[in-house]
Image (cartoon, rainbow, N blue to C red):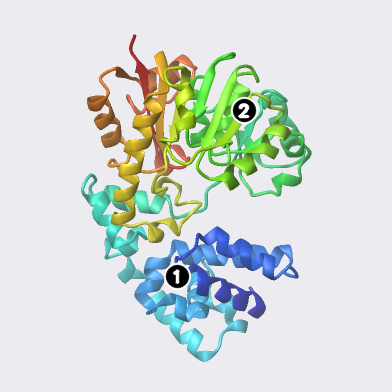
Amino acid sequence: MNAIQIEHTAAVLAEMLTFKQPADAVLSAYFREHKKLGRQDRHEIAETAFAALRHHQKISAALRRPAAQARKAALAALVLGRSMNISQIQDILDEEDKEFLSRLKARKAEFADGITTAAELPQWLVEQLQQHYTDEEVLAFGRSVNSAAPLDIRVNTLKAKRDKVLAQLQNEDIAAEAALFSPWGIRLKDKIVLNKHELFLDGALEVQDEGSQLLALLLGAKRGEIVVDFCAGAGGKTLAIGAQMANKGRIYAFDVAEKRLANLKPRMTRAGLTNIHPERISSEHDTRIGRLHGKADRVLVDAPCSGLGTLRRNPDLKYRQSPETVTKLLAQQHSILSAAADLVKPQGRLVYATCSVLPEENEMQAERFLVEHPEFELLDCGALLAGLKIDLNTGKYLRLSSAEHQTDGFFAAVFQKKQ
């Protein structure tokens, strides 16, 4: 890493470590403003900035107000997060830097003593998790989400077969392997510029975490059905469902954000899907939803959540969430799930999902729903996946973890409306 790259990283971290904006948004805006930065520069800056986020607890223990000492935070990230020796970067260090990094390395043993620094989790989140898990489990979770996620892709079955795509990627010397669970999934060992690959441009591939693919499989949409993706976002799962339905039937993709839905439209075109109908709604109580009451065969609620299952990709989230934001999300999730339930027809299926690891957002929401909606019954996720010949049984609920399943942390409950 050279001196210019360090200065750019420090400038990024001065903004990023305030946690006022999502880290990826800060980084994208900075790169747009500094168009002359080359690919290698951008790689070094991004890797170091995200290493600082992943090791923020240890950096904060050694540096008061890291955002105000962003250059030192960047240097600390090189040593703590990118495992560089001081000797490797001595050309960009002055005497004060060397002294600071020497003290930091000497403190490594101390960092292992406290659970917040050892797990790299903020105090509020440790306390929230400790209500349900042992300290050892909290520590294991923290460590499992403190490294970068692999790149998972989904093969669009309308345009290609996984075996052929996998063979093509391997023939191109791309380190790729079949996903462990999803029959549509491929895992790439290295990050590549996928959006310029012919298979991506042709719509045969989409970037999608394997856990997210499993949610679409649990929904089990079939040709000719009416399906609602209640919180569609940019539509990753919507696209998977559309392919699952062989482009037959009708999918309503609802979301409150016009911008996210706008991003879905070119993806639909690239994927060759014409059965998706994006529609912006003002809230879960929008009167336009009423026309679908009791008519949907399948409804997916990928609910707004804390996102704490995605910390490998979004390490800043644990500092941008709080007990207060989680409390607001719980009320929102409950309201959305209740509204979505009204759309399901008799014998129809409702899937509630989050990318959170908090039981308050997951099992406790599902159990409350069943009490308040006796017209629904819980289906066993393990049995549903076994019926799809997927060897994954986490019990009646789907519970995916980075540590055990090498996916993002996902939760899903599958309900069926009785006659």
Up the image or down, 334 lies above or below 15; here it is: above
* Foreground disc of the pair 1, 2: 2
Which residue occupies the foreground of this view, 253 or 90? 253
Q: In the visual, does 172 lie left or right of 214?
A: right
Q: Residues within 10 Å of mark 1 (few under 14, many from 20)?
A: some
Q: Could you tell me which quadrant the C terminus lies in?
A: top left
Mark pair 1, 2: CA separation:
39 Å
User: Residue 84 placed where, x, y %?
Assistant: 54, 70
Numbered tag placed on residue 276 in the rendering: 2
> Which residue shows up at 28% across the image and 62% down it?
123
Q: Please identify the residue farthest to the top as the structure is shown.
A: 419
Q: Please identify the residue farthest to the bottom as the structure is shown.
A: 95
User: Residue 354 placed where, x, y %?
Assistant: 41, 38
Q: Amino acid at mark 1?
A: Thr
Which residue occupies the foreground of this view, 209 or 170? 209
Q: Which residue is mark 1?
A: 18
User: Residue 195 placed where, x, y %?
Assistant: 72, 45
Q: In the visual, does 415 lie left or right of 24?
A: left
Q: Could you tell me which quadrant the N terminus lies in?
A: bottom right
> Which residue shows up at 64% across the image and 23% down it?
275
Instruction: Give the SS element for disc 1.
Output: loop
Up the image or down, 185 lies above or below 14; here it is: above
Instruction: Give the SS element for disc 2.
Output: strand
Q: Amino acid at mark 2?
A: Ile
> Which residue shows up at 61% across the image and 25% down it?
242
Q: In the visual, does 10 lie left or right of 268?
A: left
Up the image or down, 293 lies above or below 18; here it is: above
User: Residue 18 placed where, x, y %?
Assistant: 45, 70
Say whether residue 239 is visible: no
Q: Please identify the residue farthest to the front as the structure is shown.
A: 287
